[in-house]
């Protein structure tokens, strides 16, 4: 398609003028024939990189057997995936769906239904945090609470009370007779790679226990290894009652999940929720294959080592370019650099150097390499970042001289 041809895609995305035809590990090969180092991982989705041989084989094999058969029948592979996720986490029950927003919808329904079935339908409100992102459906938008996303879509869905991140007093004040749950991301991804302290998570857990509330973690972005553990809640020192997963769960195949303890899930009786595609055999095969790889003993030690190296390397670039970059933040391979220049300018300059990164709130650029990234690839990324900083600085000087 030439640049001037009209697009028939709904223009809701500001797409960069580049397209790709295939990928290999941490690399994408553009339709222009150029090789790009992919530190977007499809926004924290392709945790095992592109075209991982084990995932390709699993999906190819499943494609010859069964694509879809609905939830009218038993799902042995879905049972196996659910059992593996529960074995690795606090959860006892899993609902499969197709996206992060859907996983969050299920979390919200689980929390409301839990109280309703215990005789307290008035307990439906959920406390959320400023800077959050929970999805683009009408309920998850209301939970996200950002005016920018809500504008023009009618009155936001009722039942969400937003407070500042890290503000215990504000949370306490927000808890009332209608409160059902507290919802938080272990690390805010879209919001700018921001995390509350472990002390804050501990306070939230205590407040939930004292007031009979459910603690919901949105692990759509942080889950499935992104922070260097299979689930980020393990780093917070507390255990939620309900948790969402999506992004990396299928390694690039769409699948989401809502995980809950037996008690938290107790309201979800037959007929109370559903999904046509949820737990589709192709998606289940992809997610089981992702777990095969991630549960190998050397997988997370590698990801943690790469995290430490990348953090150090990025910090040294920040030190050398204080006029362009401000600080490094994040956990595991969910890392962000807060920029001094507009984050969009840095992302464009990096793309010119064939390094792909993702914007986040708070003028942050996210570095989200696949968890299988090598040290040589990190070094290559850092060289490209250095070059982009030099270019941006030269441009700024030229501008100032005018
Ligand atoms: C991406 C994201 C979502 C929404 O996921 P979709 O698959 O885009 O619906 C929800 N919560 C968090 C934390 C996310 O990062």
Image (cartoon, rainbow, N blue to C red):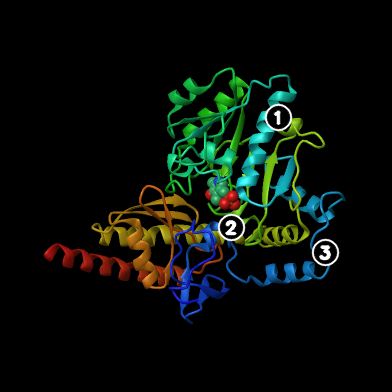
Which SS class for mark 2? helix
Residue that badge 1 annotates: 113
Which SS class for mark 1? helix
Could you tell me how far apart the alpha carbons at marks 3 and 2 are, in whole angstroms? Answer: 32 Å
Residue that badge 3 annotates: 66
Circle nearer the viewer, 2 or 1: 1
Please say whether residue 220 is visible from this viewpoint.
yes
Is residue 253 placed above or below 224 in the rendered structure? below
Q: Residue at x 17, y 64 (%)?
A: 399
Residue that badge 2 annotates: 300
Please say whether residue 229 is visible from this viewpoint.
no
Residue 216, image quadrant: top right
- Residue 99 at x, y percent in the picture: 63, 51
- Residue 297 at x, y percent in the picture: 65, 59
Q: Residue at x 48, y 69 (%)?
A: 6
Is residue 185 placed above or below 75 in the rendered structure? above
């Amino acid at each position: 398609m030439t640049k001037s041809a009209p697009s028939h895609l709904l223009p809701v995305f500001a797409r960069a003028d580049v397209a790709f035809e295939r990928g290999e590990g941490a690399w994408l090969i553009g339709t222009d024939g150029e090789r790009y180092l992919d530190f977007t991982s499809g926004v924290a989705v392709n945790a095992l990189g592109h075209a991982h041989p084990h995932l390709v084989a699993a999906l190819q094999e499943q494609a010859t057997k069964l694509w879809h058969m609905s939830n009218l029948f038993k799902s042995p592979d879905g049972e196996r995936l659910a059992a593996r996720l529960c074995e690795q986490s606090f959860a006892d029950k899993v609902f499969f769906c197709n996206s992060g927003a859907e996983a969050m919808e299920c979390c919200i329904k689980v929390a409301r239904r839990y109280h309703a079935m215990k005789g307290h339908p008035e307990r439906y409100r959920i406390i959320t945090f400023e800077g959050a992102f929970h999805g683009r459906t009408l309920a998850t938008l209301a939970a996200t609470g950002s005016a920018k996303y809500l504008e023009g879509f009618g009155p936001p869905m009722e039942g969400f009370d937003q407070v500042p991140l890290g503000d215990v007093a504000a949370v306490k004040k927000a808890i009332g007779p209608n409160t059902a749950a507290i919802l938080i991301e272990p690390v805010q991804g879209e919001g700018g790679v921001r995390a509350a302290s472990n002390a804050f998570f501990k306070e939230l857990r205590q407040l939930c226990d004292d007031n009979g509330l459910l603690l919901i973690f949105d692990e759509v972005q942080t889950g499935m290894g992104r922070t260097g553990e299979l689930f980020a809640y393990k780093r917070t020192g507390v255990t939620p009652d309900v948790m969402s997963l999506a992004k990396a769960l299928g390694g690039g195949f769409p699948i989401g999940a809502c995980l809950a303890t037996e008690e938290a899930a107790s309201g979800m009786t037959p007929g109370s929720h559903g999904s046509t595609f949820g737990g589709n055999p192709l998606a289940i095969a992809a997610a089981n294959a992702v777990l095969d790889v991630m549960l190998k003993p050397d997988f997370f030690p590698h990801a943690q080592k790469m995290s430490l190296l990348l953090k150090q390397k990025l910090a040294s670039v920040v030190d050398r370019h204080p006029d362009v970059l401000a600080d490094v933040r994040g956990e595991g391979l969910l890392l962000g650099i807060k920029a001094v220049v507009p984050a969009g300018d840095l992302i464009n300059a990096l793309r010119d150097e064939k390094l792909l990164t993702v914007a986040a709130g708070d003028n942050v650029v996210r570095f989200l390499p696949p968890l299988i990234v090598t040290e040589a690839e990190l070094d290559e990324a850092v060289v490209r970042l250095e070059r982009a900083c030099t270019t941006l600085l030269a441009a700024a000087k030229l501008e100032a001289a005018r």
